[in-house]
Image: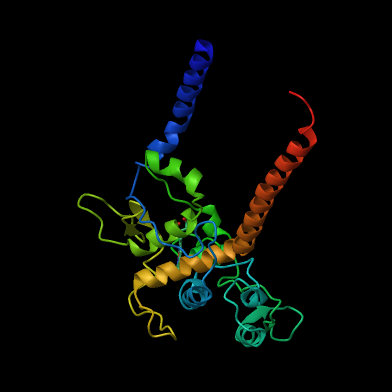
Amino acid sequence: MIKFKTIFAALALAGSLALSPAAMAAEEGGMEAELQDWSFAGLFGTYDTHQLQRGFQVFREVCASCHSADLLAFRNLSEEGGPSYTEGQVKALAAEYSIPDPSTDTGERPAVSADRWPSPFATEQDARDSNNGAYPPDFSVLAKARGISQKFPYWAFNYFTAYQEGGPDFIYNVLVNYAEPPHGVEVAAGQHYNAYLGHGISMPPPLTDGLVTYEDETTPQTTEQYARDVSAFMMWMADPHLASRKAMGFRVLLFLVLFAGMMYLVKRKLWADVKH
Ligand code: HEC
């Protein structure tokens, strides 16, 4: 018994040593992320169609002039669980854009629903030339490729709460925390200080209050609201099947619980006449 305890203590110590760099990383650089209440969080979370539509509007009117979204096809915007525009709306939207096509006289043609979202720049070099040498990353899976870091006990809870909104929380915090650099901090030319990151970033602050006019006038037209909406849209773009995956996971768990109960009854029946 004593031996077992010693082994356990050694394992726990090794574990905490191995994990401590992650905990330390949280203390570097900027500020602690302010976590948002996402509709798609938790076991039963789903995307909010209206929020995705607003987020798409912010993406289209603001971010898409610099950032590409190579994996997004126009027709995705009418898929169930997403912004859920009608097929007619998507067709009309696509027709507003043109796609390079060397086989035509003009070298381009109007986009159709099956086309991918057109890039704002023809090449990466063009994108860098227009952005002080920095490359605006593609949005397709950015929300899945980013996360936040948290101080020690908090990230440990995430294993139990199934927290997986680090991407949109990161994007939101970058967007709302542009600020004057604190005293003594130098920001390189062409960079803008971001208090969340704790250093300069080559993207100028993209959002200001009132920048985008929402159709629904009850939704606040503030930087915070735009940032939340576009982050939710980017999460959908990176993980469009999140809601159906959660629903399936729940059904599987329910099945396993029922199945375990049934197996228990079967075991009772089979062993009923056996003396033990
Ligand atoms: C004027 C061009 C421009 C616009 C408009 C713009 N961005 Fe950016 N963005 C950039 C550039 C350039 C970078 C790379 C910054 C760097 O590497 O320092 C960047 C970086 C980012 C990053 C950080 C990515 C990372 O690697 O961690 C996020 C998040 C982001 N943009 C989101 C947005 C969102 C959301 C919008 C729309 C609301 C937007 N951007 C609008 C140019 C732009």
Q: Nearer the viewer, residue 196 or 19?
A: 19
- The x and y percentages for residue 176 are 35, 64
Residue at the image position 42 percent from the left and 46 percent from the top: 149
Question: What colouring method underlies this structural image?
Answer: rainbow
Residue at the image position 63 percent from the left and 69 percent from the top: 72
- Quadrant assignment, res 105: bottom right
- The x and y percentages for residue 247 are 62, 60
- The x and y percentages for residue 156 are 44, 40
Q: Which quarter holds ligand 1?
A: bottom left
Residue 146 shows in this picture: yes
- Asked if 104 appears above or below 227 in the picture, the reply is below
- Quadrant assignment, res 94: bottom right
- Quadrant assignment, res 249: bottom right
Image mark count: 0
- Asked if 245 appears above or below 11 in the picture, the reply is below
Residue at the image position 51 percent from the left and 57 percent from the top: 42
Q: Nearer the viewer, residue 268 or 258?
A: 268
Q: Nearer the viewer, residue 16 or 199?
A: 16
Residue 67 shows in this picture: no
The answer to whether residue 23 is left or right of residue 81 is: left
Q: Residue furthest left?
A: 183
The answer to whether residue 263 is left or right of residue 245 is: right
- Asked if 89 appears above or below 174 in the picture, the reply is below
Q: Could you tell me which quadrant the C terminus lies in?
A: top right
- The x and y percentages for residue 7 are 52, 16
Q: Nearer the viewer, residue 213 or 29?
A: 213
